[in-house]
Amino acid sequence: MSNQRLVELAVGLFILAAFGALLVLAFEVSGLNRLSGGDTYNVSATFNNIGGLRVRAPVKVGGVEIGSVESIRLNQDNYEATVTLALEGDKPHLPKDSSASILTEGLLGSKYISIQPGFDTEMLANNDTIDETHSAMILENLVGQFLYKTSGKGKDNK
Amino acid sequence: MINQIASLGRTGIETCRQIGVSGIFLFRTLVRMPQIRKTLPLLIQQMYAVGILSLLIIGVSGLFVGMVLALQGDHILSQFGSEDQLGQLVALSVTRELGPVLAALLFAGRAGTSLTAEIGLMRATDQLNSMEMMAVDPLLRVIRPRLVAGIIALPLLVLIFNVIAIYGSALIGVNWLGISSGSFWGNMQASVDFRTDVVNGIVKSIVFGVAVTWIAVYQGFYSKPNAAGIGRATTNTVIYGSLLVLALDFVLTAMMLGEW
C-alpha cells in the first residue's frame, strides 16, 4: 500500500518536474514573456532596401531595445519595403519627426532598426508612419562603388 | 540461384507481414474502450518503470551533452570572436535536434529493452497465455499501460533533458569560460522561438515515443518463447528503435523546415 503510494508520489513529481522544464524552456530559453508581456503599438516605416532585415529583429533607441519588427512586406505601387514595428509601451513616447535607419550589429552581425528621436512635441501614435528613413548599407554595393571610383581614378592618371 | 532469389522474396514477404501484424497489434491495443479506473494504477506503475527509472541516465547525459556543446561551441565561435552566440547555438541544437533524438535513443536502450525483456519473459513463461485462460486480455492488461506510459514519458524526459543540457552549457559557458551571462541568455531568448523550436521538439519526441515503445512491446509480445528469442527481441528493439528514430527525425525535420 505504502509502496504504491510512493510510486504515485514519484510519478507525480516526475510530471511536475517535466512541466517545470516546459516553463523554463518557454520563459527562460525562448523568451516567450517578451512577446506576450505588456502593451505594444505599431508604427510603420518605408525603406528603399531592407538588406536582410528579418521579422522579430530588434528596434533600438540609443542602443536600448524598445520593440521588434512585426512584419515586412513589399509595397506593390512603388516597390519599396514597408516595415511594421511593434514598440513596447502603452502610450507613445517617440517624437513625430524621429528617423529610422537599418544598421548592422558589428561588421557581420544581424540587422536591426535604430530610431533617432526627433524634436517634435507631437508623438508617434498607433499606426503612424515614420517619414524619414535610411536604408540598409549593402556591403556589396559599397565595395562596388569603391572599386568603380578607384578604377576611374586609375584611368585619369594614365 | 533460384533458391536464393526465393529466400530473398520470402524475407521480403515476412517483413511486410510483420509490419502488418505490428500495425494490427497497435490498433487492437489502443482502439478500445478506455477503462480509466482499471488502467490508471497500472499506468502509474509503468510510468515509474519507464519514466522515473530512466530519469538518471537522461539527466546525466543531458548534463554532459550540454557541457560538451559549450566547450566545442566556444572553441569554434571564438575563432570568429562571437562567443556571445554560444547560448543560441546550444539552445537551438538541443531543443531542435539533440534533445529529442538523444533522449529517444537512450530511452530505447534503457526503457525499451526492459519492456521487451519483461514481456518476452512473460510470453516464455506462459504468463500471457494463462491471462487469456482467465479471460484477461493481455493486450489491455499488459501491453496498453506500457505503451501509453512510454508515449507519455518520453516527451516529459525530453523536456527535462533539454533544460538540464542548457543549464549544463550555461555552467560551462558562463561560469568557466567567462561568457557574460546577459549575452548568453539574451542571445538565446532572441533567437529561440517557442512555437518553431520548443514545440516542434516536443512534437518530435511524441512521435519518437510512439515509435520506440511500439517496437519494444511488439518485439516482446511476438518474441520466440525461449532464452535466445528474448535476447534476439531485445537486440531488435534497440536496432529497429534507434534506426526508426533517426530516420523519422530526418523526415520530421524536413517537414518542419518546410522543405517538403
Image (tube, rainbow, N blue to C red):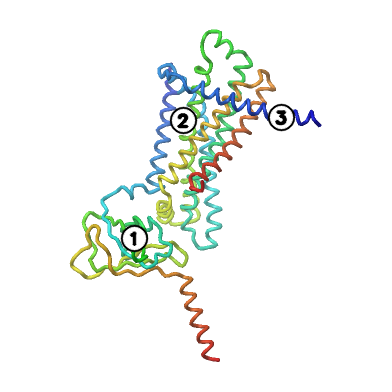
> Hey, what amino acid is under mark 3?
Gly
Output the chain of dot 1.
A
Output the chain of dot 3.
B
Report helix, strand or loop for mark 3.
helix
At 54% across and 45% down in the image, what residue appears?
Answer: B65
Direction from residue B225 to residue B260 in the image, left or right = left
**Do discs 1 and 3 share a chain?**
no
Q: Position of residue B63 (x, y in %)?
A: 51, 43
Q: Position of residue B80 (x, y in %)?
A: 52, 63
Residue A3 visible (yes or no): no
Q: Is residue B40 above or below residue A87?
A: above
How far apart are labels 2 and 1 at the CA level?
Answer: 43 Å
At 32% across and 57% down in the image, what residue appears?
Answer: A67
Q: Name the residue under label 2.
A: B152
Q: Is B27 in front, or is B130?
A: B27
Q: Name the residue under label 3.
A: B9
Q: Mark 1 points at which residue?
A: A83
Output the chain of dot 2.
B
Which label lies toward us, 2 or 1? 1
Report helix, strand or loop for mark 1.
strand
